[in-house]
Structures are given as structure tokens and as C-alpha cells.
Amino acid sequence: GQQLNQSPQSMFIQEGEDVSMNCTSSSIFNTWLWYKQDPGEGPVLLIALYKAGELTSNGRLTAQFGITRKDSFLNISASIPSDVGIYFCACMNTGFQKLVFGTGTRLLVSP
Amino acid sequence: DVKVTQSSRYLVKRTGEKVFLECVQDMDHENMFWYRQDPGLGLRLIYFSYDVKMKEKGDIPEGYSVSREKKERFSLILESASTNQTSMYLCASSRHEVGPNGYTFGSGTRLTVV
């Protein structure tokens, strides 16, 4: 099945650093979502993006929907230990019943 | 607080056993999904259901079956468990047309087959 290309696959950073991860697709989608999965839990929705070029923030998180509608990035500023987890991008088009997921970025934060 | 509940957080089963993983949602969602998650492979869709008694194969249905007798419950069945089915299993649900809230996931069941 189709999956999105998500990079990097993993990151190990120091507390306080900024983080950036991105997601690309060969197809156009009109909605992009970003999820976070805490260790041992299911993914939880962080941010949803609906318009090409849209920039949305949620606390220390900022996500953008690429102008070509084929990519998105997620930034985390001033990382803290509780940011540890796996971050997934996902996308869909209107009327879809299923999301397409990225392969995930594993984030480790050193205190 | 709306949620998706998976009956077990951890399971250990023997090779050849029939295994049932249960998932219940309280959001009156039409769609329900079963994924397995393995390191480096992301989320792979096993089966999904968009209505009671309806099911469709996902990307990796081999060795699995599902049952949806009631709208709120979606069961994943491993007919004869094998060691390569050791994995994290995630259940999710959504509205018929996946809207801006995406999927709601359960906490997962970590299955070990020995």
C-alpha cells in the first residue's frame, strides 16, 4: 500500500534544541495530519492542515502544508524530555475513508 | 472522554494458538481499523471495516481475519499464531468520511508469540 516518505527516520537531540522533520508524497493530498505516539501508547493527533501553504502552531509545535500539496513539515522548538516518541505524518483527500501514513520519525531527547 | 479501548495491553501466546484481539469504541464511529506496528515499518493496515458485518482487506491481511458484529466492536483474529506475528497491534476508529479529527487510536496490544 501507499506510504509517505518521512525523514529523518530517527533523531537524538539535546534538551532545548529545535527539531524539524518532514514528509513527502508523490501524490497530491488536500489534508495533512501529524500524530505523536508516546512510548507504549497509541498515536494522538497533534495538528491538522487543510490548505496548501497553511502554517499552524500548537504550543511549541509548528506545521506547514506544502504549497504543492505533496509535502509537510513539523517543527518542535525548545525540545523537552516529554517530546520523546514517534511522530507520524498522515494525509487524505476529501471523501477518503482511509488515511495514508508516513513511516514515522523516532525522537529521543537527552536531558 | 471519548475513546478506543483495546482489551489487553500485553499478551503472550503460544505458536498455533487462536488469538482474539478486541477493540471497542464509544464514539459511534462507522469506520474501524486494525494496524500492526513494527520498528522501521511504520503502521501497516491489516483490515478495516466501514460498517457492521462489512470488512475489507488492508495491505497485510494474510494470517488474520476480523469480525464486526456490532458497530462499536471490531475483533482481530489470528487463526494460528506464529512467531512472525509478534508485534504491536493498534486499533483505530473514525467517521465514515475521515474528517479533520483523523483517526482515534487505542493504546495498543503488544503481542508476543512464543
Image (cartoon, helix red, strand yellow):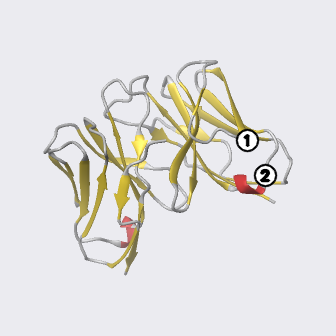
**Quadrant of the image containing the C terminus of chain A:** bottom left
Q: Earlier in the sequence, mark 2 or mark 1?
A: 1
Per the image, the residue denoted by label 1 is B63
Disc 2 residue type (three-letter): Ser
Q: Residues within 10 Å of mark 1 (few under 14, many from 20)?
A: few
In-front residue for pair A96/B24: A96
Cα separation, mark 2 vs mark 1, equals 9 Å
Do labels 2 and 1 touch, CB within 8 Å?
yes
Tell me the kind of residue under disc 1: Gly
Identified at 71% across, 38% down, the residue is: B64
* Quadrant position of residue B79: top right
Q: Nearer the viewer, residue A21 or B11?
A: A21
Residue B30 in the image: above or below residue A24: above
At which x and y percent is residue A66? 18, 48
Q: Could you tell me which secondary element the residue under label 1 belongs to?
A: loop
Q: Residue furthest front?
A: A26
Residue with the mark numbered 2: B82
Mark 2 crowdedness (10 Å alpha carbons): few <14, some 14-19, many ≥20: some
Q: Position of residue B17 (x, y in %)?
A: 85, 46
List x then y, in percent, for residue B42.
Answer: 49, 54
